[in-house]
Every structure is written in C-alpha cells, then in structure tokens.
Image (tube, rainbow, N blue to C red):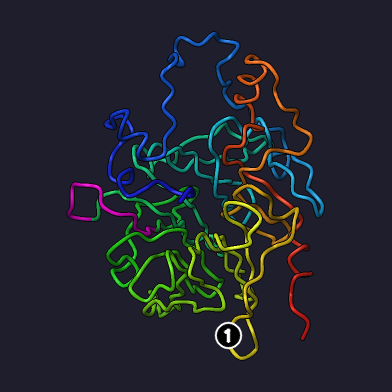
Amino acid sequence: MLWRPSGACRSRRLASLTAREAVQCGLAVLVLTSLACTPARERPAAAPQAPRGAWLGQETPGATPVQFAPGIVDTDLNQRDTAWTPDGRELYYSLANGSAGTIVRLRQLADGSWSLPEIPSFLEGEPALEPFVTPDGRWFYFASPRPLPGETEAGDWNLWRAPRRDDDWGQPAPLPASINAAGDEFYPTLTRGGDLVFTAKREDSLGGEDLYLARADGDGFAAPENLGPQINSRGPEFNALIEPEGRWILFGSARPGDAGGGDLYISFATDEGGWTPARALPEPLNSPALDYCPALSPDGSQLFFTSRRIPAGTPRPTTYRALVAQLHTAANGSNNLWWVDAGVLAKLRPAT
C-alpha cells in the first residue's frame, strides 16, 4: 500500500539501494539529471522561517480543509503526520520519502518567532515516523525500525517513547514486547488516561493491518485487543487518532466505495463500551486522493491530517517549465499537511 515503505525498504538505508531495488520499494528513480546539475532557479528552495504567532502565524481555517503553512511546512517534499506539545510551542512532523527521512520539529522562540526545521537530537541518524505527544506532555511516542536494546541491526518497525526532560526529550526506549510483537507496529495514539491505539497486522486481524487497543495498566499496558468489526474491515485500517477522552476514533482505511486511495473514517464510543459502525468523512474532508494520518491540536480546536490532494484551483501545467515549477511547490500532489476546524467532527455523531 502507499502509506508507508514496503518491508524491503524498512531495513535498508536509501543510499544502499540499487536503482532496481528503489523501484521495487516504490521510490521514483529519475535518470535524467541530478539535482546538483539542475539550474538553481529550478531547485526546491529551503523552507523560509515562519511568521510570529500561534500556528506558525497561520490563520485558522473553517469547515473546508486548507494546506498548513504552504512554503514553510508544506513544501515540494513529502510531509506527513502532525504532533504538538500541549503549550502549542513545538510542532513535530515526518519528513520522509521511502526509507529516507525522519521526524523534524519547529520551536516557537521567546520573541514569538519560530525556528527553522531541525531533527531532534535523539532522532539524529535514525529513521522515524508518526510522532505523538501525550496530552500531559510527558511522553513523545513514535515508530522506528532502529535497533532494539542489545541489538546492532535495524529490525521491523516498533513503537518507542521518550520522556520529557526540561525543554527537550530524553533517550527513547521501546514499548514492551506485548505491544512490539513480531511484525510491524505503527502510529501510536493515546488517551489522556493512557490507553494506546496502534496499527498492526496480527493473527486475529480481520484483513490487512488492523487497529488495536491496549488499555493502560499501571505504568504499562494490558494485552492489546483487536478493535473489532465495527472499526476494522477486510481491508487495511491504519494511522488512527483516538480523542483524548476516548469518545471517538478517527482513522485511515482503504475500502470498497471510498473516495480515493484511502479515506478517513470515524467511529464513536457507545455508552455500552463498544463502538458505532465506522463511517467515512464526507467531502471535502475526504478527497479523491489519499487522506490519512489525523491529529488534533492541543486545545482540540483544529484537526490536522495528511493528504495527497492538489489544492483546488491549481492550474494544470501546459509546458515542461511549468510542470517543473509546479513539482517544486506544495501543489505537486505529494504528502502534505492539511487542517480544518475540528468542529466538523461533532456533526458526524449518530443520533441517539
């Protein structure tokens, strides 16, 4: 599927791939000219510094999704996943393509301006995706194939977490083996009470990858449980967001009848402890392109997600020069961050 690298890609650095392997891993191999030989005017420019103020100086959206900070966060590269610290002064997202990439962050400085993107020190030189900061700000969760303690070789994708240490994060440690079982685990999301939802493919999966819930148990987690047929289907489910109080789950899935190559679906918690049948979000929240990787702002007012849609009104290029120019913008159809007023979700709750 399109939302993460294939197994062959996960355990190797991009630099070690042959051209044939790169094609097999879903990477675009262009044998035309290297970036170093491209005229300077055609090279992707470094992201400029964000304006002062909350949300990187961006005006909050209404009920129609818009790209988040185009030219600053959203660029001609592949941006996906979103996580904020509770004070809204640190933004984390994944900057990756195939097996190359990791999580980056921007920090708001004392004068209200924002830093340029940087790789956090504990992720330097390590592949990582899918950041999540717990609602209390104490833990930073992510997915990575980095070697487990006592090992030297990268393995499958596991879930890790790092504790908050003053104004940064401490050394990460993997979650217990009951969570990081054989195979890959992805996209951690937690409630305020510490319940964990993640993506995995296991013996009791209903189709491909499914969503699993591991209830908080002291400082750890109880055994994970498949979230069942109200949420999971015979197709893949992936990259979920559980609302901080556990009132709903928003997730990606590729099912018959969806609007594109994968849509966002929502299921609400019931008074009986179950879940309502998942329903697809309506357009324009979903689009004919892949929509996935939901996240909430710290105050719950904004819904962020990743989409491969091209902004409405973008003209189709008619010349090679115009095509190259568009491909070097955030309107090139690659993964980008979008946001919308989170109030749109409340309108989707079934009538009781």
Where residue 146 appears, x then y in whole percent?
A: 30, 48
Which quarter of the image is occupied by the C terminus?
A: bottom right
Where residue 307 appears, x then y in whole percent?
A: 62, 46
Q: Is residue 50 left or right of residue 35?
A: right
Q: Inspect the magenta stretch and tell me whether residue 68 lies in it.
A: no
Asked if 288 appears above or below 320 in the picture, the reply is below
Q: 17 or 51: nearer the eye?
A: 17
Please state which amino acid type lies under the numbered disc 1: Gly
Q: Inspect the magenta stretch and tell me whether residue 155 lies in it.
A: yes
Q: 119 or 352: nearer the eye?
A: 352
Q: Residue furthest front?
A: 256
Identify the residue under disc 1: 274
Segment tinted magenta in the rendering: 149-160
Residue at image position (47%, 62%) is 188
Q: Is residue 90 left or right of residue 122?
A: right
Q: Is residue 24 left or right of residue 42?
A: left
**Dot 1: element:** loop
Where residue 239 appears, x then y in whole percent?
A: 51, 59
Where residue 301 appears, x then y in whole percent?
A: 73, 59
Q: Residue furthest bottom?
A: 272
Which secondary structure class fits the magenta region best? loop
Q: Is residue 233 left or right of residue 289?
A: left
Asked if 121 appears above or below 261 in the picture, the reply is above
